[in-house]
Amino acid sequence: MMGARANEPPAARTAGAVVEETITFDDFYHAHFGSVTAQLCAYTGDLGHAQDLAQEAFYRALARWDRLIRYDDPVAWVRQVAWNLARSRWRRLRTARNHLLRQRRTEAEVAGPTPDRVAIDAALAQLPANHRRAVILHYLADLSVNEIAAQEGVAEGTVKSWLHRGRTALAGLLDENTDGVCDV
């Protein structure tokens, strides 16, 4: 096709005419904000911080929207930025916690989550980080094994292994923790 530039997606053809497929940032945001937030909430265990992280990732996407719209999967870029922000948040929290421990200050007690949530969060927290990410991306983000492999930069077999090991570990951890968990 004449006139195509590097780093630009191919245009769709309709009855001999070339039609550009475009999506507005607002449509993109409304279509993906909820799922990105849900993934981050499962990873961080805090809905408020998950919403903040997703908002920041989408803000960064808006600043680059002209380039980002040309990507094959712009939501993967947003998701990766959000996960990077979450990791940075964990590092900052760890540093702050260590500082507080050195100062020997005690934290105020806050009402806790439900027993079900505690069991699931505790079980997820015991998984290795790569297994936890794979389980969250597969079951909460509904990403395929191929998509997770591409995002994490590993082979599909590795993702399958992470998912199998993560499910096996969760099953064992949740079976052991059923004493205080309510039946639904």
Image (cartoon, rainbow, N blue to C red):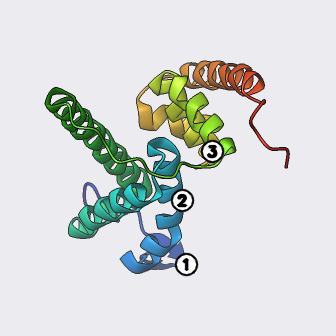
Q: Residue at x 46, y 66 (%)?
A: 33
Whichever of callouts 2 and 3 sits on the residue coming sooner in the sequence is 2
Whichever of callouts 1 and 2 sits on the residue coming sooner in the sequence is 1
Instruction: Classify mark 1: helix, strand or loop.
Output: strand
Instruction: Classify mark 3: helix, strand or loop.
Output: helix
Q: Residue at x 52, y 65 (%)?
A: 34
Q: Is residue 73 above or below residue 151?
A: below
Q: Could you tell me how many numbered marks the image carries?
A: 3
Q: Quadrant of residue 120?
A: top right
Give me the C-alpha separation between circle 3 and circle 1: 50 Å
Q: Quadrant of residue 68?
A: bottom left
Q: Are marks 2 and 3 in contact (CB under 8 Å)?
A: no
Pointer 3 residue: 117
Give me the C-alpha separation between circle 1 and circle 2: 32 Å
Pointer 1 residue: 14
Q: Is residue 118 above or below residue 15?
A: above
- Callout 2, which amino acid? Ser
Q: Quadrant of residue 177?
A: top right
- Callout 1, which amino acid? Thr
Q: Residue at x 44, y 71 (%)?
A: 28
Pointer 2 residue: 35
List x then y, in percent, for residue 53. Answer: 34, 56
In the displayed structure image, the side of residue 139 where residue 52 appears, left or right: left
